[in-house]
Amino acid sequence: MKENKSAYKTRFEWSYLKPAYWPSWLAVFFLLLVALLPLSVSDKLAYLLGGLARRVNAKRRRIARRNIELCFPSLSTEEKKNFLRRNFRAQIRSVLHYGVFWWMPVPILKRYFEIRGQEYIEASRQAGRSVILLTAHSVALEASLAISYYYPVTGFIKTIKNKLTNWLVFCGRSRLGAVLYRREAGLRPIIKDVRAGQVLLYFVDEDLGRERSLFAPFFGVEKATVPVLGRLADICNADVLPCMSCYDEKQHKYIINIMPPIDDFPQGDDSLDAVKMNQYLERAVNLCPEQYFWTFKLFRTRPDEDDKLY
């Protein structure tokens, strides 16, 4: 197979063994130990550590609380507090499960996830259409990459300053064959991959600033939205399927929920496409709202620059 020179790659370096990286190696050792535990046990640990994380991380707690207030105004004060508590527990649980998704042998890993809606991918491919998964930023992000066990997958990766952590994340996310690119690579290699039959995991719900965005409602709040998905779908002759990964606490299993293709999309108008995209993102998030990344500054960029929400 011809080497993909545009794809992101990183390799182990002997400098990662220096003392500066020892705290990171301790974290790796801890995650390895947790990966050996039954998920029911690590879930109880997440319950305890999630409460601790919520108390000590005041910045993220304030951001999440503000997002919950904005997006779920009908909830009572106590319901919002419980929502916040469960969100932090879900985030810590997903971190504790990194070792499972990154290092567990694949035959064992398959026990820990289930794909629902896979028939929608199959239907699109059988109709000769490309597939883009409009993937919400669930705290169970790593679970979404399990799709690459069944299909060739392409997508973007955000690099991390800590080089050891960056290498570990890259290895974990690409080990089942996903081809990943930095945003600096642009859309051209992604378009080429999707046209060639790879499934694109497309995360589009971060606030990337005013210059790259237009505004569209998200849970009733105007949000800076990157208007690229409609153009991608058109260029790639692709169906867009919303996707949300959720953790089922009763089954102790990750459920990757794939929804039917967005109807009448794209419409050829960036504003209309952005509105529809956010509507379907909402539907995906509502499958397990407490497991979304509410600690992001989702509404940092405002239509009125003097209107500060955080």
Image: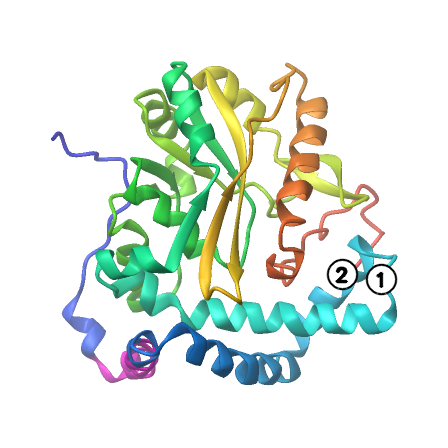
156 sits to left or right of 151:
right
Binning the other alpha carbons within 10 Å of mark 1 as few (below 14), some (14 to 19) or many (20 upward) gives few
Binning the other alpha carbons within 10 Å of mark 2 as few (below 14), some (14 to 19) or many (20 upward) gives many
User: Residue type at mark 2?
Assistant: Ile
Q: Position of residue 27 (x, y in %)?
A: 34, 79
Residue 242 appears in which quarter of the rendering?
top right
20 within the magenta span: yes
Which SS class for mark 2? helix
User: Residue type at mark 1?
Assistant: Leu
Question: In this picture, which residue range is highlighted in magenta?
Answer: 18-31
Q: Earlier in the sequence, mark 2 or mark 1?
A: 2
Q: Position of residue 13 (x, y in %)?
A: 17, 65
Tell me the residue that label 1 is attached to. 75
Q: Is residue 217 visible?
A: yes
On screen, 3 above or below 64?
above
**Quadrant (top left, top right, bottom left, bottom right) of the C terminus:** bottom right
* Circle on res. 68: 2
Q: Is residue 178 visible?
A: no
Q: Are marks 2 and 1 in contact (CB under 8 Å)?
A: yes
Residue sitting at x 11%, y 31%? 1
Mark 2, mark 1: which one is toward the viewer?
1
309 within the magenta span: no
Residue 223 appears in which quarter of the rendering?
top right
